[in-house]
Image (tube, grey):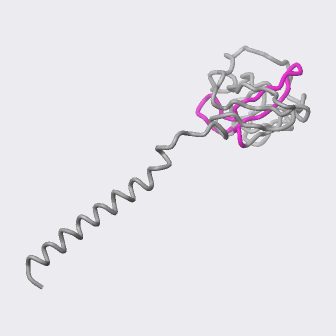
Amino acid sequence: MSDIDRRRFLANGWKLGAGLIAAAGVWTSWDLLQPRLASGFGGVVRSVPADTVPEDSVLEVPAARAYLTKIDGEVVALSETCTHLGCKVPYCASSGQFECPCHGSVFNRAGDYLAGPAPRGLDHYPTTIVDGVVEIDTGETVAGGPPGTMTVDEPAKGPACEGGHGG
């Protein structure tokens, strides 16, 4: 094998390697270049029949990252994200309130701010009832009300959950 053949072999090898790396980059980036579908979180999520949404509690809808409840007979979808620093806020069945385990913010069943460092109540998602099923538009967020806004006047039902501070 002469020096010229070795040089040509190495040059072709480098070109092939660079081509494979470029192809791998395009292959792994292809999903990012595709348009987002308007279903699932960030779009419209079909959830549950409207008549199964509770009037005195909440129903979690994991696909929408939201909770459903009825306020004055109207279905309301509340974001599960605390307006303070974005922690997931669980609903405490014993107190009947949302209690953020991270920094202690407390919200009532309607998402109204009750206590803690959160700057406002829980954000809402628009809902529509289509063929008896609640559809949650997670692509649009309605900001929660400022402290002092009270949609429902419901005192704590009982003790706070572990990590919560009650209301």
Residue 120, position as x, y percentages in the image: 65, 21
Residue 84 in magenta stretch = yes
Q: Is residue 77 above or below residue 47?
A: above
**Left or right: 61, with 81 as reference point:** right
The quarter in which the N terminus is drawn is bottom left
Residue that lies at the very extreme toward the left in this rendered image: 3
Residue 82, position as x, y percentages in the image: 65, 32
Residue 45, position as x, y percentages in the image: 72, 37
Residue 80 in magenta stretch = yes
Report the number of discs. Answer: 0
Residue toward you, 41 or 115 = 41
**Left or right: 24, with 2 as reference point:** right
Q: Quadrant of residue 17?
A: bottom left
The residue under the point 87% across, 31% down is 132
Residue toward you, 141 or 137 = 137
Q: Magenta residues, as a range?
A: 63-88
Q: Quadrant of residue 109?
A: top right
Residue toward you, 16 or 115 = 16
The residue under the point 56% across, 39% down is 36
The quarter in which the C terminus is drawn is top right
The residue under the point 81% across, 32% down is 134
Residue 105, position as x, y percentages in the image: 68, 30
**Left or right: 96, with 89 as reference point:** right
Q: Is residue 2 above or below residue 64?
A: below
The residue under the point 67% across, 16% down is 146
Q: Quadrant of residue 37?
A: top right
